[in-house]
């Protein structure tokens, strides 16, 4: 074997050895792992308006009138009467919520015209001045499972004339709820029964 052949053979052997070393450099031990399934679910905003908790009760606006015969009923209103009845609103969802109340499906001559009967809503026990009812910008806070009592008040003005004799009407109380967390109220909006602030965590021991 010539020296030239020996050199070629040695070079091929070295190249093969280097190739084998390069291939083995990518053969590290490896391992993988996964966690248990991480499950999330969105909460729910639900609200339920129940039936009246008791009968409507009359309050006279002109105390000391000639006759207080107590024969009035919500189906036999006098001009000047105010009839109030409590109704329960319940948070049946899983999230804390804010709700407002209003009237819908208002029908009938009693609730129309220049001196129509009016409907107002108050949170019981009162969280607003006695003369101020819940308006469109007044929100009531409820935790999940919590309830609030809303007083429905119907007032037939004393100025109602003969055109209202025998007039009738009806309405439906409407409650509209939104999530309380991460909700920014607009200008003029307010929470009439804000929740108590969360207690501050105790200081860390030094």
Image (cartoon, rainbow, N blue to C red):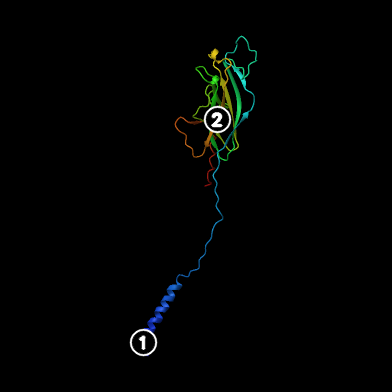
Q: Where is residue 61 drawn, in percent x and y?
A: 57, 15
- Whether residue 187 sits left or right of residue 141 in the image: it is left
Quick check: 48 above or below 76? below
Residue 17: quadrant of the picture: bottom left
Residue annotated with mark 2: 174
Residue annotated with mark 1: 5
Q: Where is residue 162 drawn, in percent x and y?
A: 55, 12
Residue 122: quadrant of the picture: top right
Residue 1: quadrant of the picture: bottom left
| Residue drawn at (44%, 76%) of the image | 20
| Residue drawn at (43%, 75%) of the image | 21
| Residue drawn at (39%, 83%) of the image | 10
Q: Which mark is residue 196?
A: none
40 and 102: which is toward the camera: 102
How far apart are labels 1 and 2 at the CA level? Answer: 101 Å
Is tag 1's residue or tag 2's residue first in the polypeptide sequence? 1
């Amino acid at each position: 074997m010539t020296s030239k052949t020996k050199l070629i053979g040695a070079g091929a052997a070295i190249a093969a050895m280097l190739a084998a070393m390069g291939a083995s450099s990518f053969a590290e031990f490896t391992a993988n792992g996964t966690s248990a399934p991480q499950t999330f679910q969105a909460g729910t905003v639900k609200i339920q308006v129940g039936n009246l908790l008791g009968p409507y009760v009359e309050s006279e606006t002109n105390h000391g009138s000639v006759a207080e015969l107590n024969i009035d009923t919500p189906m036999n209103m006098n001009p000047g009467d105010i009839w109030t009845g409590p109704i329960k609103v319940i948070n049946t969802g899983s999230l804390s919520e804010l709700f407002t109340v209003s009237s819908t499906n208002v029908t009938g001559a009693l609730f129309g015209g220049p001196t129509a009967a009016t409907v107002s809503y108050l949170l019981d026990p009162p969280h607003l001045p006695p003369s101020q009812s819940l308006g469109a910008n007044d929100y009531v806070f409820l935790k999940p499972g919590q309830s609030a009592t809303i007083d429905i008040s119907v007032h037939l003005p004393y100025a109602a004339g003969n055109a209202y004799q025998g007039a009738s009407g009806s309405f439906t109380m409407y409650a509209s709820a939104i999530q309380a967390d991460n909700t920014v109220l607009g200008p003029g909006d307010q929470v009439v029964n804000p929740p108590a602030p969360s207690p501050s965590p105790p200081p860390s021991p030094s």
